[in-house]
Image (spheres, helix red, strand yellow):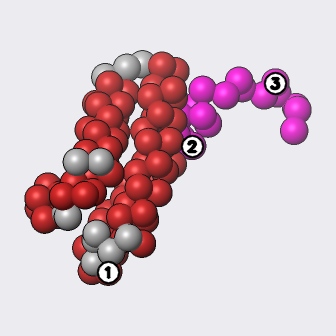
Amino acid sequence: MWYEYYRILPTTHRYTLGQKVDKYFTEIIEAVAIAAFLKPEEKIPYVRLAIRKSDVLQIFLNILWETKSLDDKKYILLSEKLNEIGRNLGGWNGSLVKKNSPKQASGEK
């Protein structure tokens, strides 16, 4: 979906923000792929990196929309997908933190 939109971005943004967005998508995929093959306790930094990259990516997409380089429909479709990715990453991070937190001693609350 992004590649189709990237190709039709105005040239003033295609080679600036467009390339940054492309880079962030790639870095998110890379962080998730690395985390997928690590031990649970080693995954957290990569999942959090993907979350941070996703947050920045949302800002860049918002700028493209505000400058009218992305129309409403394209922005909404991308934002919905990115929000879903963010929810999934957040859930993954939460479960990893829960699994890796020190167990409470019996009788403690």
Q: Position of residue 42 (x, y in %)?
A: 48, 19
Q: CA distance from mark 3 to mark 1?
A: 53 Å
Mark 3, mark 2: which one is toward the viewer? 2
Q: Which residue is mark 1?
A: 72
Residue nearest the viewer, comparing 100 with 69: 69
Farthest bottom residue in view? 72
Which numbered disc flags the more N-terminal residue, 3 or 2? 2
Q: CA distance from mark 1 to mark 2?
A: 32 Å
Q: Quadrant of residue 105?
A: top right
Instruction: Please check the rendered image and state whether residue 104 is part of the magenta-colored stretch, yes or no.
Output: yes
Residue nearest the viewer, comparing 59 with 76: 59
Q: Is residue 37 positioned above or below 89 on the image?
A: above
Farthest right residue in view? 108
Q: Which mark is residue 94?
A: 2
Q: Which residue is mark 3?
A: 105
Residue at image coords 67%, 28%: 101
Span colored in magenta: 91-109
Q: Position of residue 107 (x, y in %)?
A: 88, 31
Which numbered disc flags the more N-terminal residue, 1 or 2? 1
Mark 1, mark 2: which one is toward the viewer? 1
Q: How many marks?
A: 3
**Numbered disc 3: secondary structure:** loop
Q: Quadrant of the N terminus?
A: bottom left
Q: Is residue 1 left or right of residue 51?
A: left
**Numbered disc 2: secondary structure:** helix
